[in-house]
Image (cartoon, grey):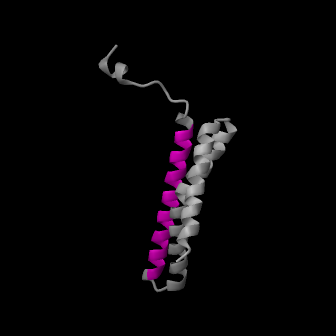
Amino acid sequence: MTTNDSCQLPPSKHAPIELVLARLLWLGSIAAAILIAVGIGFMLIGRSQLASHLVTIGLLVLLATPIMRVVTAALIFVREKDWRFACFCLVVLCALAAGILLGHGG
């Protein structure tokens, strides 16, 4: 046995979930970056109307990515009947919804 073997932890039961959620965050970030970059490109060539829409969509995708992460995690936990973590996700979604709704008050 080497010293590296003694430092390794057993695989977590949530490792597949973490992989799915990491991919979701990566894809959302990449999609948002591409939309914003294309929007900036259109802005540089003088298509400001289209550029404005693309940048706005890119920012919305960027803002929606963590929300989709929580929704996806909740669906996975419900499917696995892990009610404790599903409830945690529901609380986080309620907090996000309250923040969004209260943010429109001004």
Which residue lies at the image location 50% right of the left edge and 74% below the top edge?
55
Percent across and percent down for residue 106 are 52, 77
- Number of marks in the rendered image: 0
- The residue lying furthest to the left in this view is 3
Percent across and percent down for residue 53 are 55, 77
Compared with 85, 1 (above or below) is above
Q: Report if residue 89 lies within the magenta region.
A: no
Residue range (magenta): 17-43
Which residue lies at the image location 55% right of the left edge and 30% below the top edge?
13
Which residue lies at the image location 54% right of the left edge and 46% below the top edge?
21
Compared with 52, 1 (above or below) is above
Residue 20 or residue 76, whichever sits in front: 76
Which residue lies at the image location 52% right of the left edge and 40% below the top edge?
18
Residue 26 or residue 43, whichever sits in front: 26
Compared with 15, 20 (above or below) is below
Determine the image quadrant of residue 41. Answer: bottom left
Percent across and percent down for residue 25 are 51, 52
Predominant secondary structure, magenta span: helix
Percent across and percent down for residue 5 are 36, 20
Compared with 7, 91 (above or below) is below
Dividing the image into 4 quarters, which one contains the N terminus?
top left
Q: Report if residue 35 lies within the magenta region.
A: yes
